[in-house]
Amino acid sequence: MDVARINTSHGTLEQHLHTYERLRSLSADAARPLGILVDLPGPKVRCASFGEDGAYLTEGDLISVVSGDIGSTADRVEVQYETLVADLRPGDRLAFGDGNVVAVVEDKTSDTLKARVIFGGLLRGRSGLHIPSDRLRITAPTSEDLKLLDAFVEVGVDMVALSFVRSAHDIRRLGVEPAPRGPLVIAKIETRAAVDNLEGIIQASGAVMIARGDLGAECPIEELPHLQKQIIEACIAHGRPAITATQMLESMISAPIPTRAEASDVANAVFDGSSAVMLSGETAIGRDPVATVRTMARITERADQEFDYESWANHIGNLRSQHLDDESEAGRITDSLTMAAWQVATQLNAKAILCLSRTGFTVRSIARFRPTTPIIGFSPDDLTVRQLSLSWGAYPIKTIDRATPGEMISDALQLARDQGGLRSGDLTVFVSGQSTKTRATDTLRVMRIP
């Protein structure tokens, strides 16, 4: 894996910080950059625990749904949401656990919803309950989100994901420093409002996660595959990594191999242009998380071999030209030069594209074209190096912060040979800024490894 996600919806802050420190230690032992992503719970509505063994809700049964946090059973579900009864009405669908169990509200009293189970199933732990985002009275980020965020920013977390984003304003309310001075902010697209406000959200965030569980409950299921493609395309066009998540290899929670449909789903996420694919329950509570990660890696590696790189790059290049008027001058310069770097590397059959970048922006800009040439990203900033673990095709290497660009380029060429797998005499395309302080990528050189 390249990134470890800590889901703060479960467990305590102390447990999460312990996990964080273990991951840092293991990454150091392996001498391999590992990005750590803290996923904030947001205004996620969850049921009180069904217990480890869970409870089976049977199709046709009438159940009571109430506010509370003591515990849930098969006939009485407690939900940790105070205004639950006030916010819902007869006819509303209740989707539990990413839609694994569905009930419809038939009646309500002052403190209880009566709902008929129309699709039964087993619910374990603190299953989520989907409530249409336009009904939720709580917004993201919540006070609990901000408390968790402060604790992880203090220890230097690499990335933070905000749940149930509705607009760019939600992203700005986090109040963190822009990456890499602060964590890379990942907007989770799981509401209809987020789809409607996608352009602004992409521009305000550092990356996007397509959280298909709640998004699939909020939107018609037949629309979900097309939304996935549209969101990924928009993210990559703007140089933002796109993560496809939820139920990728769900059956491997208990089975030794995935279903054929799941394998196809993972491969299609690659063909759609995803920067990364994410496992959640499969590795959090699955029987064999190591085998699951290996299976995901094999499927994505094979899909990468069949990806239509040339058509994708041309398509993204054309799409970006439609947005250049909205970019700053530095953005337009970087757009043009990174596209040129991809073209030059392809035409010269270069062994690698070397990117010197303090913030990672240059690496992400080149990665959106999906070059067949390996990308090696150099940065003197530890946080940038770890954040680049999320970027498609990027191999990040830490450099020393030198006084001049020339010295940093010389160091990078040697590191490419010593750590990046290149050999003396290999032809490379090197992109950087004229100054280490500039935000524009304005220099392209064809150089050989010394």
Image (tube, rainbow, N blue to C red):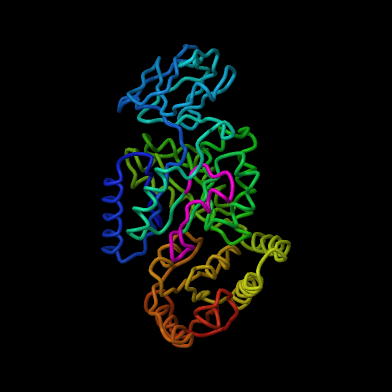
Q: Is residue 222 above or below residue 93?
A: below
Q: Is residue 17 above or below residue 225?
A: below
Instruction: Residue at 37%, 57% (x, y): give it.
Output: 153
Instruction: Residue at 57%, 19% (x, y): give it.
Output: 89
What secondary structure do most residues of the magenta stretch adopt?
A: loop
Would you say 384 lies left or right of 202 here?
left
Image quarter in which the N terminus is found: bottom left
Q: How many marks?
A: 0
Would you say 344 lies left or right of 287 here?
right
Would you say 179 lies left or right of 33 here?
right
- Highlighted range, magenta: 162-183
Which picture quadrant has residue 292?
A: top left
Would you say 344 lies left or right of 281 here?
right
Residue 446 in picture, x, y percent from top left: 57, 83
Q: Is residue 124 above or below residue 289?
A: above
Residue 32 in picture, x, y percent from top left: 34, 64
Q: Is residue 385 above or below residue 286?
A: below
Image quarter in which the C terminus is found: bottom left
Q: Magenta segment: does it hold 175?
A: yes
Which picture quadrant has residue 378?
A: bottom left
7 or 292: which is nearer to us? 7
Residue 37 in picture, x, y percent from top left: 40, 53
351 or 134: which is nearer to us? 134
Residue 397 in picture, x, y percent from top left: 40, 72
